[in-house]
Every structure is written in structure tokens, then in C-alpha cells.
Image (cartoon, rainbow, N blue to C red):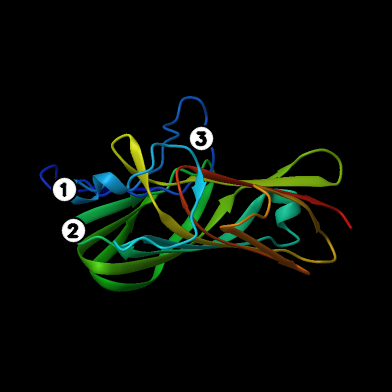
Amino acid sequence: MHLTPVYPFLAAALVMLCLPAAASDDPEAWLEQDDDSLTLLVNEGALEFLQDAPEHRVLQTRNRLTVTPNSLRTGWVELYQCQGNLDPVPAVEVVYRYHGLRKLRVISTRGIERTRVEQNTVQMEQVQEGGEVCIEAEVQVLKPDGKGVWSLQSGPFHRRFLDGYYPVQLEYRIHWPVNRLQLESVHPEKQQGFLVREQPGELLIDTLFAGKLTIKVRFSAP
């Protein structure tokens, strides 16, 4: 998904979190902000996991995907997503570029005067500094990857400025039925700055990063 200003004279403010697009789609995902005071803080594109939070405002993204028994047949999973610590803008839209998206709805906002859903977008007006919007939807993202194996890929997550990237704080969770699936692998692997925790039926990833991050998860039948 990406956020684009409704009026062309507004400072650019773009955010996108999506699954890989087809070759004919725009694969880029970003949050752009026209602020020369931050240009020295950008990463030039290589993925970097960070230990310390920067002093300026960091985009905070919370994602929760819930895989149900029916998901194994249809590929549809439940999505809950919040974008927080937003920049102040008079008008902005969130565009979701999932190949399969349905039942998109806004469930809560903070520091945003008005919101409405139009097809695969969420339109927002009078976003205050540090505002937050949370949505629910269903997305067709679970793919069979051989007999008794499934894969789920999310990303690329990033916040882009011109040819560089600002830090993003990401909390990413997946829930699944323990009697139907078991976790096989996560990419990237657990490392400093990229926390991965697993317990029966749940995966949690918590990371602060700059650059472009794609998360790939594989499941198998127990």
C-alpha cells in the first residue's frame, strides 16, 4: 500500500506495505517526505538493521496476519494493520496493491479528522502529527508451495526519500492453527536488530531497519 497526497501542491507523503507485485505493477513501496533537514539520515538502499532509534519521528507499522483452516484451501488470510506516527498533512490516501484484497475497512483512527474507504484506498483528511490509522481486510497471500507446504511473503517494507530510505519500526505477527501448520523457516533469519520469536501458532518479528525489507515465511503440515 502507499500513501499519496490528494492535492499536488502538498508536500509528498507516501507509505506502502504490500506483497510482491506482478511485472506490470509498480513494485515500489515508500513513505516520502520533502524535508531537507532529514536528508543526511537516509540509507542509500542496502537493508540495515538498526540498534538505536533515531532522534527524528519514525514510521511505526503493526501488521497481524491470521491464517485460518479455510486459508489453506483459498489462500485468503485476515489482515489487521496500523500505520502510526504519521506526518501532518491536509489530505492523503492509502492505496493497497495486493493482488487479492477484499472487505477493506477502517476500524480506528487517532489524530485524523475524517476517513473513508474508496475501492482499494483509504482517504484521510487533516492528519495531525503522530496520527494513526488502523484497518482490517482480507488478503489472498498464502500460496501452496508443493504438497503439504505453503509460503507467505510480505514486503518490501520501506520508507523512501528520493534515492534513500528512512528507518521504519515494524512489528509483524502471524497466527495460524497449530493442528494444521507448523513453521518451517523465516527469512531473513534472526539476528541483531531483527528479533524473531516463535511459539505454538504464532510468529513475532520486531525490527527497526532502513532500506527495503521483504519477509518470507514457509509452513508445512505437522
Identify residue for label 2: 89
At horizontal 31% and vertical 63% (from top left) the residue drawn is 55
The residue lying toward the viewer, choosing from 47 and 102, is: 47
Res. 75 mark:
none
Q: Position of residue 3 (x, y in %)?
A: 31, 50
The secondary structure type at the circle numbered 2 is strand
Tag 2 or tag 3, which sits nearer the N-term? 3
The residue lying toward the viewer, choosing from 99 and 130, is: 130
The quarter in which the C terminus is drawn is bottom right
At horizontal 46% and vertical 25% (from top left) the residue drawn is 24
The amino acid type of the residue labelled 1 equals Ala
The secondary structure type at the circle numbered 3 is loop
Tag 2 or tag 1, which sits nearer the N-term? 1
Q: Are marks 1 and 3 in contact (CB under 8 Å)?
A: no
The secondary structure type at the circle numbered 1 is loop
State how far apart marks 1 and 2 are (Cα). 8 Å
Q: Position of residue 75 (x, y in %)?
A: 67, 49
Q: Are marks 1 and 2 in contact (CB under 8 Å)?
A: yes
The amino acid type of the residue labelled 2 equals Val
The residue lying toward the viewer, choosing from 155 and 144, is: 155
State how far apart marks 1 and 3 are (Cα). 26 Å
Of tags 3 and 2, which is closer to the observer?
2
Identify residue for label 1: 11
At horizontal 77% and vertical 66% (from top left) the residue drawn is 177
Q: Is residue 85 above or below residue 189?
A: below
Identify residue for label 3: 21
Tag 3 or tag 1, which sits nearer the N-term? 1
Q: Position of residue 1 (x, y in %)?
A: 41, 48
Q: Are marks 3 and 2 in contact (CB under 8 Å)?
A: no
The amino acid type of the residue labelled 3 equals Ala
